[in-house]
Amino acid sequence: MIGIPARFRSAVASLVVFLSVVISISPVTAQSRVELMGEAIQGGVIIGLTEVGTKAVLDGEPLMVSDTGRFVFGFDRDHTSAAHLDLEYPDETRESLLIEVAVREYDVQRIEGVASRYVSPSAEQLERIRREGAIKRAARPRDTDADWFAENFIWPVKGTITGTFGLARFFNGEARRPHYGVDIAASTGTPIVAPAPGIVTLAEPDLYFEGGLIFIDHGQGLISVLMHLSSVDVEVGEQVVQGDIIGAVGATGRVTGAHLDWRMYWRSAHVDPALLAGEMPAPTPLERPQNGADAQ
Ligand SMILES: [Zn+2]
């Protein structure tokens, strides 16, 4: 398993155990020619490595495979069925893998004190929300077979996690959409870095819900969304490498305090950034946590 980051090891082990069960009950080759890294779980992202020139299909939909043999797919917060991965290798040998997707339990979060204009927007605000929705839809994702996602992800900001992926949410007592991001509390002005390489596909200083907003395309439909920024320091089309400063933490948009909301999508699936970035490193004394949370 060359090149697999340490934090994937336990997950890979459990996946391999499962796949070996599949192999034992089906007439597939004993030696699989594909490696899958990641967690087969709701919100999980799986990175595959196979032979160059292989065709990969997930549940009937073609995947891209890079010129180094890498591909990616993910499972939505509410994904329920097992996934079928079909591979056709360059010598026309075929292999099919059945991947069970583990179900998660999500906590409930109740946030009070959300400004009423965010809970019940006016007609004028709804028009702005509609207009900005079109801008966001147009920005993602790009049709590229790049494999920038293959680099190990890092946290874009270090701080206390105040909201995890998948939380069921209530604002001022009213049920709202689940929380699809990871909220990281940090002071306004704290630099935000690119968690992995990619191309900037959206850079907006002030949207209604998100405030300052950046999209980074990591290739093959996997994108990062970084929200509530006080400063957006990149432009659309810019290529970033991991660790580049792209903006600063803020309290813009629909929030109750300064923090970064980092979300990720694979195609239309909401996936969990924490599964890629691993454990949050301890903050330095200069990175004092606040109590910021948002209402996204
Ligand atoms: Zn959030």
Image: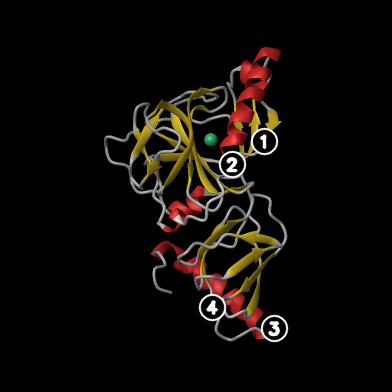
Q: Earlier in the sequence, mark 3 or mark 2?
A: 3
Say above or below: 192 vs 122: below
Which element type, helix, strand or loop, lies under badge 3? loop
Q: Are marks 1 and 4 in contact (CB under 8 Å)?
A: no
Say above or below: 166 vs 80: above
Give the residue pinned by disc 3: 26
Label 3 – label 2 distance at C-alpha? 37 Å
Q: Where residue 256 sits: x, y (%)?
A: 51, 24
Residues packed near mark 3 inside 10 Å, few (<14), some (14 to 19) or many (20 plus): few
| Kind of residue at badge 2 | Tyr
Q: Earlier in the sequence, mark 1 or mark 4?
A: 4
Which element type, helix, strand or loop, lies under badge 2? loop
Label 4 – label 3 distance at C-alpha? 16 Å
**Residue 180 bears which disc, if any?**
2
Which residue lies at the image location 37% right of the left edge and 30% below the top edge? Answer: 233
The response on whether ligand 1 sits within 8 Å of label 2 is yes
Give the residue pinned by disc 1: 177
Which element type, helix, strand or loop, lies under badge 4? loop
Position of the N terminus, as image quadrant, is bottom left
The response on whether ligand 1 sits within 8 Å of label 1 is no
Nearer the observer: mark 1 or 4; the answer is 4
Residues packed near mark 1 inside 10 Å, few (<14), some (14 to 19) or many (20 plus): few
Q: Are marks 4 and 3 in contact (CB under 8 Å)?
A: no
Which residue lies at the image location 59% right of the left edge and 52% below the top edge? Answer: 43
Nearer the observer: mark 1 or 3; the answer is 3
Q: Are marks 2 and 1 in contact (CB under 8 Å)?
A: yes
Q: How did the renderer colour the structure?
A: secondary structure
Q: Where residue 40 sits: x, y (%)?
A: 59, 62
The response on whether ligand 1 sits within 8 Å of label 3 is no
Position of the C terminus, as image quadrant, is top right
Label 1 – label 4 distance at C-alpha? 40 Å
Residues packed near mark 2 inside 10 Å, few (<14), some (14 to 19) or many (20 plus): many
